[in-house]
Image (tube, coloured by chain):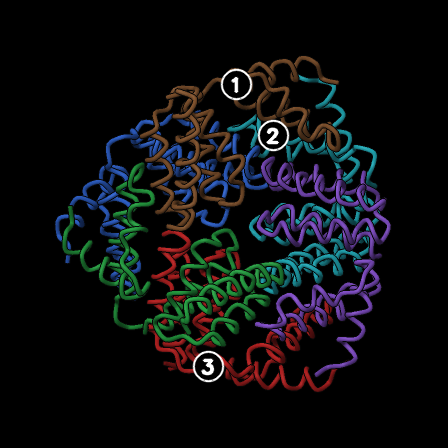
Chain colours: A red, B green, C blue, D brown, E cyan, F purple
Amino acid sequence: MDTERFERGKKQLEMMSGAGVDAMLDNLEGIAPDLTRYTVEFPYGDVLGRPGLDLKSRQVATVAALTALGNAPVQLNAHISMALNVGCTREEIVETITQMAVYAGFPAALNGMAVAKDVFAARDRKGLR
Amino acid sequence: MDTERFERGKKQLEMMSGAGVDAMLDNLEGIAPDLTRYTVEFPYGDVLGRPGLDLKSRQVATVAALTALGNAPVQLNAHISMALNVGCTREEIVETITQMAVYAGFPAALNGMAVAKDVFAARDRKGLR
Amino acid sequence: MDTERFERGKKQLEMMSGAGVDAMLDNLEGIAPDLTRYTVEFPYGDVLGRPGLDLKSRQVATVAALTALGNAPVQLNAHISMALNVGCTREEIVETITQMAVYAGFPAALNGMAVAKDVFAARDRKGLR
Amino acid sequence: MDTERFERGKKQLEMMSGAGVDAMLDNLEGIAPDLTRYTVEFPYGDVLGRPGLDLKSRQVATVAALTALGNAPVQLNAHISMALNVGCTREEIVETITQMAVYAGFPAALNGMAVAKDVFAARDRKGLR
Amino acid sequence: MDTERFERGKKQLEMMSGAGVDAMLDNLEGIAPDLTRYTVEFPYGDVLGRPGLDLKSRQVATVAALTALGNAPVQLNAHISMALNVGCTREEIVETITQMAVYAGFPAALNGMAVAKDVFAARDRKGLR
Amino acid sequence: MDTERFERGKKQLEMMSGAGVDAMLDNLEGIAPDLTRYTVEFPYGDVLGRPGLDLKSRQVATVAALTALGNAPVQLNAHISMALNVGCTREEIVETITQMAVYAGFPAALNGMAVAKDVFAARDRKGLR
């Protein structure tokens, strides 16, 4: 196992999600431990901590892409929350999703916004910005 | 016709594309003048000039989404160029596209990068950054 | 605000949905009032009332596209209902969705048909055709 | 072989394409004769000749879906031509594609319109409406 | 009706699903009997029983494609189960889905794996391998 | 740099592609050396050499997914060739692509088959099976 990348990825993921990641890691670990490990190593260990693009912009990119693709609402939910954790404002999220009406159509934007609404409400309940 | 939105959109598009837009407007005007007009009015007149998200971040969002969708290389080409025009660095474009390997797969990222390579080469020939 | 387009869009949407649209407008208004407004202005105010294609055919086009894309069941539900409201028969909806098995595969068609089944059942309960 | 469905499909395809279909049938026959045969049997022999939705509406549905999916320009080209052959006007094609800006985004609509432009020009050269 | 293809398809489907198919056939039959019939005739009657590719590989192909497309979880669930019924191991399913992280992105793979987890749990409860 | 994964990936890629990979590696290296490196490390170094699914089945999965997605013909071309290199027959490729007509529609299958036709012709010229 590639301990260094995994540890780097785990730290990156914890920093972005604002919480311990054991629950997430446990979820699929029973049946697909290696996919779980790759998810920590490649996206978080290799890519999201790279220099050359600030983390806020990286989350704008991910929120845009997942809204446009429209078939991963669970991941969109998680990444909107991480975007807010790393410094994006709610307004920036709303603007990013609104803009997807242009590039992926109104249904994609409306469905992305419904996910954002859920995230904002959940964060309100927890007192998160 | 909605002159104010059209004029606002035309200015926004000219500012982002760094050139007169008549060629682009002429292209489909013969068969679909209203789609051409809507393209100026809604994306450029309504959305891309909105406050709440800076224009660099808006172009990161668009480059990310078009790379992820993978079926609009002509528009991706245009938006990479506009991203550079409004202040994104080539490195930021490369990072945005690289990140799409995570969210839309390696083929999408590699094909997006091939478009970026073309844009960069065309701009080198014109002495643009 | 572009009052004329908004009012035209609101009328078009009310005519097609067969009901007041305030509930729909309220839904995202708290977090994204402008996306809500654009949804009224551009699809309903600009596009769906255009001459050159009758409204029944427009709804066939939308039901076909949303079935083929397969990632917007909420909007497909709404547009099947609007299609019936503007004069499409249930048989025409079923045929449109069936045909998508050819162009987008059987899973897309079967999932679209499941949405149609829900719409038909809801309308049966309300005594709508 | 299912001669009846194949013959029915071949007639339907010839009627819609306005020409003998041997060239099309020959194209992939060398390597995939059965996919070629299925293409005649299922879409043309089973689906497109069904009652319950007129042929013009069927072609509006197909043009809408292929424009929205955005990854089959060759087939979109063929189906725009068939739409015109079975009675759609060029305006109806332009309206159908324009409407896809709403449901699949502007890039999809603009790329679909570029295909329509090619079809219209080719038909102008042949003196077809 | 094309009795021979339907009967062949029904047998193929029963063999793959390990159960009578009447429930499945009944589901949409009320509103779309012909789509139901086509689903038996074309995928099961024509394609999945073809020689030239063994049935295990066919199910690997389907699981891969539905995971990558990401918008048909109900069908992915059914095809993972059929894959196991025709001889694929759970490990082969997990590997196929893991591999889709490369070609369609991590969200697609993670969502496909969540479906597999459900299938495995349901089969554990029934004592199926 | 993660030398071990890169070297393992390079060997895997060379084995599958039947040639030195320097040309491929050079292609994007000028502008995106890290995406190139990741492409060697993650797909080839981590995933494709895994036990639990034989390499022929892995290539069936990839050919199926890329045919279904329909927006990566360059990668589909490369993976059909690699599939043949690792032991798939041309018939198995044709069957895999034909089957995608069921799950992603006829246009996706026909476009995938056109790519296969090109690959087969190129290999005929080189005397490859």
Q: Tell me residue A37's x, y (percent).
A: 69, 75
Q: Chain of mark 3?
A: A
Q: Neighbour class for label 3 at 10 Å: few (<14), some, many (≥20)? A: some
F119 and C93: which is toward the camera: F119
Tag 3 and tag 2, C-beta contact below 8 Å: no
Q: CA distance from mark 3 to mark 1?
A: 56 Å
Mark 1 lies on residue: D49
Q: Which mark is residue A54?
A: 3
Query: Going by the image, does D98 lie left or right of F125?
Result: left
Q: Secondary structure at mark 3?
A: loop
Mark 2 lies on residue: E36
Comparing marks 3 and 2, which lies closer to the viewer? 3
Q: Secondary structure at mark 2?
A: helix
Establish whether labels 3 and 2 are both on one chain.
no
Q: Chain of mark 2?
A: E
Amino acid type for the residue under numbered disc 2 = Thr
Q: Chain of mark 1?
A: D
For the N terminus of chain A, the quadrant is bottom right
For the C terminus of chain A, the quadrant is bottom left
Establish whether labels 3 and 1 are both on one chain.
no
> Compared to D72, does D39 lie above or below?
above
Query: Going by the image, does E12 lie left or right of C45?
Result: right
Q: Residue at x 35, y 55 (%)?
A: A102
Q: Tell me residue E116's x, y (percent).
A: 69, 57
Q: Residue at x 15, y 58 (%)?
A: C1
Q: Secondary structure at mark 1?
A: loop
Q: Tell me residue D58's x, y (percent).
A: 45, 26
Amino acid type for the residue under numbered disc 1 = Gly
